Image (cartoon, rainbow, N blue to C red):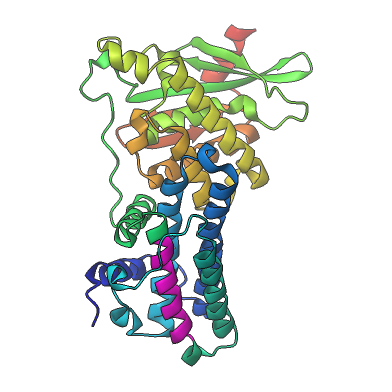
Amino acid sequence: MTDNHWLLEFAARAAKTDKFNDKPDHAALLAMGLIGEAGSVVAELKKKCRERDAYPVYREKVVEEIGDFLWYFVRLTAVTVPGLLEELPEPDKIALPAADSTQLPEHLDFGAAVGEVLAAVSASRHDDIRTPLRRVWVLLAAIANDADVCLCNAAVRNTEKTRSRWPDEKRYVPLFDDAFPVEEQLPRRLQVDFLERARGNHRAVILRCNDINFGDRLTDNIEDPDGYRFHDIFHFAYAVHLGWSPVVRALMRTKRKSDSTVDEAQDGARAGIIEEAVSAIVFSRAKQLKFFEGLDHVDLDLLKTVKEFVEGFEVEIVPLWQWETAILDGYRIFRALCTGPGGRVTLDMGRRQLIYEPHSVSGDHAKQRHQLL
């Protein structure tokens, strides 16, 4: 029986987040994930060898990649060789070679051992998987040792990331401005009209609230129209689902001026630029996916990229699932605005909801149109 209590606990948590459980090719899918993550681990060494001191994030990346690999390792081991995890030696009790400056031998052997596991799974020879899995474990310990990474810490990091994306219970992070005066809070409820108008050969979008225009008149700013003129909806989605949007604060004049540090660091121009960059990056991916139509998730790599962009700002503590919700809900409304074209959007921060209503040809919309002509 192993003393790797952390490994068994990690395996139990991993089982709860295995999205392949009900698939007939369960083991094959896990094996594919295993070799994919093994490639990511080896790729980090390649980057380190190539970039040397110009790649300062090596250890941070290796911790994450080893954690991801561990997830697939414990799941595949539990599915194909029940009981093997309990037999694996503790990493600090494995006889490891002296650290090598290149680390290449362990990485190449590691890749070969993972390949043996994949071959056995592919041929449905589960009886032949035990030995290569044990070898993978030993070589993984050597790689972690070379990178000065604790396998237990890598597992903890993976668990944190998994909980950030798929929590047992979804609880929104409290609003960042709750303790500030009401005039420095993002509006808790707001109705915004998105009005589309001709502007030469282009279409422009005007934002209107309480019969007052605000913000800039936006066009797509690209040769082939793609609807980006409606992109302010993404900022409103961030405000509702993240409690964060320096862009909306600037539009609504709700910067937190009572705290000079917060005003400069969280509500300043740099934060707004970062938010616009996030919107543009997500939009580029969304265009390839029909603006997330019919999808109920955002790929993890994109969410991780977004999280990297906002490091150092208050929103960095927001979990991945909130970002995913903000993105998907924002694009739900975006698609409706493009179809409208335009419409009225209600922001309800108390309920964390965005509500879309198409403009009618009469009533408020007719009145607004008359006022704008």
Q: Is residue 367 above or below residue 285?
A: above
Instruction: Name the quadrant of the C terminus.
Output: top right
Q: Is residue 67 visible?
A: no
Where is residue 341? Give x, y as percent.
64, 29
Name the residue: 29% across, 15% down.
261
Query: Quick check: 204 left or right of 238?
Result: right
Where is residue 147? Give x, y as percent.
41, 55
Say which of 129 and 45 sits in front.
45
Q: Main secondary structure of the magenta part?
A: helix
Say which of 133 and 8 sits in front.
133
Where is residue 365? Give x, y as percent.
56, 20
Does residue 140 belong to the magenta stretch?
yes
Does residue 348 belong to the magenta stretch?
no
Residue 19 sits in which quadrant? bottom left
Q: Which residues are magenta?
A: 129-144
Where is residue 151? Give x, y as percent.
34, 61
